[in-house]
Amino acid sequence: MRQGSRAIQQLKQFKLLLITLLRYCSIALFTALLFLPFKGLNAAGIMFICILALLSVVSLLKKTKIIDAIKTIRIPEIKRFQRFFIPVFLISSAALPFILKDYYIDVLIMSGIYILLALGLNIIVGFTGLLNLGFAAFYAIGAYTYAIANTKIGLGFWASLPISASFAAIAGLLLAIPALRLRGDYLAIVTLGFGEIVRLILNNWDSLTNGPNGITGIARPLIMGFSLAQLEYYYYLIFVFVILAVVVIKRVESSRIGRAWIAIKENEIAASSMGINTTKYKLYAFTFGTFWAGIAGILFSAKMQFVSPESFTFMESILILSMIILGGIGNTYGAIIGAFILVILPEVLREVQLYRMLILGIGLVLLMIFRPQGILGGVKGVHFRS
Amino acid sequence: MLLQQLINGLTLGGVYAIIAIGYTMVYGILELINFAHGEIYMLGAYLAIIFLGLFTAMGLTAASIPIALILTAILTIIFCSAYGFTIEKVAYKPLRNAPRLSPLISAIGVSIFLQNYVMLTQGATDKVFPHRFGEAGFQFMDVNVTYLQALIILVSGLLMFFLHLFIHKTRMGKAMRATAQDKTMAALVGINVDNIISATFIIGAGLAAVAGIMVASYYGLVNYFIGYIAGIKAFTAAVLGGIGNIPGAMLGGIILGLVESTGSAYISSEYKDAYAFIILIIILLIKPSGILGKTTEEKV
């Protein structure tokens, strides 16, 4: 009797397994067929096997609760280790140029510039919850301001620095004044449109921007008549700016203004009923965020000694947004980590260069499904509201 | 000259309107800017070229062009609808209850993936549509209208008309409207919300496929990045007309097409792509809810 029921149970289990397998096979077949017209039968076959394997792995992982762990695990608060972590980080970063090859220093300089951008965007998207899809436009304004001022008027780096930064900030302010009347997604699309308009102007205003060919021969910064032509010196310059940005942004974040921003993100109506002038603080966020984009822009054009509209596309805006999402939206350290990873990763993946955008695309989807709060997790208990 | 531009604009506007409907339907139900929608249009254009090339190789095109074209259209629509369905299941459904930013980022991820997938498999160079329609046409009030233009205007008009009927006269359409108003209440009265969302994506993707076929045959050239700019413009059209509002999307698309063609003829063709955004910003400043949109108060 007992044996009989066990046999039935085994049969049931077998049936269940068979059904699951059949289901997976049909899903895989369906998905593989979608790839058929683009790459032919072989690729579809490979896709079929890949998807089948993926489904089985995911269903196995679900049983072991690894996925739940990925979703909920908390990376320890950096704050707790701040005393230890920050000095180590500072000293090792300062020592890096002595031990690394030029190529790596170059990558580090680029990641420094992107860290500045990510920090700036994090103020707008992460703190205040205003989705900005055209951030590269402000980066472009900063870069082009210096490029034009330097090549046409002969203005130096330090003289241009405040001009670049304030031009970007003013552009941010001018866009924000009308755009902030809009809610959520509309704001996203207006910023996106602004990004496109800026790129089109750079592309077509030949007399000022030299069109798609870009501007060449931009000077490196001088310090007391001494040109920062060597990569190491430039690295330190960027390093100083990043430290400055982190310190300033951290201070502002914990000030009255920063708390107002987070209140606006949490619940705009509640914030305004608590007496926060939401429009004013949103304008602050936009201006302050784009200010850093301007600084990143001037550092970029001084580093490259060349700017062209190619560097400021919509993909660039998306890349910066991906950085802060990867790190954990609203988290300053997260923005740094995210920017660092997304600059380093393409260099590591140089072997499969063609596929890296493909991987970025899949990665974004997977990140959203399995760990939407990013690596460090956003600010505690904060949800994004648009 | 002006009338010629109007005809060109109407052709373009028809295409934008059909893509915009897909955006507006998805936004109406999920409040999601479906960034991947433009890529489905791009996939449609590519699939049309691939299938028509296949039929040409099989000798079907030589036998009868209309049959080959119709078969191409049917296959393309089926495949694109399947893409739309799959994208929703893979990238958006797991995020149904996530904060609003998550599905948006996921959509951007899908868009990047599809663009690069097509670039890798089909090459980064322009693809040529295998069949040329030529300049043959008829005279309409001193203006030369090619048969293809007439066909595009006709097809987009018909599609909009049938969609309108579908939304307002069928059970499914009624269920869609109910879901767009309130998902929870719709579920409570026995509507299968998941199925409705799938249906929305399938219809939207099918329409985008038609737009893709039309553009591929009209311009004769496609590239893997056409989806991005067309998608943004179509979304602009949807916002212009009032997002979530289907007649609004149609109106917005046509206005956008007209402005773009007259603008590039009379002002400057270099800034062709900027007109869409300039109009968008102006409209949003004057009437943020769009031309036909209703203003909704934000709830606590």
Image (cartoon, rainbow, N blue to C red):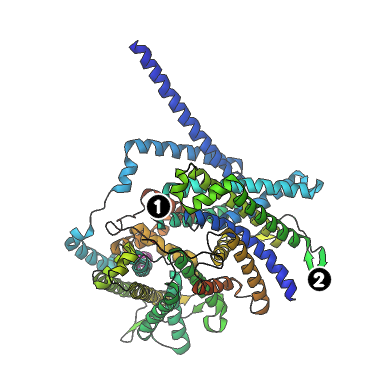
Q: Residue at x 74, y 58 (%)?
A: B151
Residue assigned mark 2: B141
Disc 2 with disc 1 on a shared chain: no
Which mark identifies residue B228? none
| In this picture, residue A111 sits left or right of residue B183 | left
Q: Nearer the viewer, residue B13 or A91?
A: B13
Which mark identifies residue A368? 1
Q: Position of residue A53 (x, y in %)?
A: 45, 37
Residues under numbered marks 2 and 1 in contact, where contact means CB atoms less than 8 Å apart: no
Q: Position of residue B150 (x, y in %)?
A: 75, 61
| In this picture, residue B109 sits left or right of residue A68 | right
Can I make out residue A192 in this image? yes
Given the image, on which type of amino acid does mark 1 rest? Met
What's drawn in magenta, residue-wise? A103-108
The residue at the far bottom in this view is A153
The residue at the far left in this view is A83
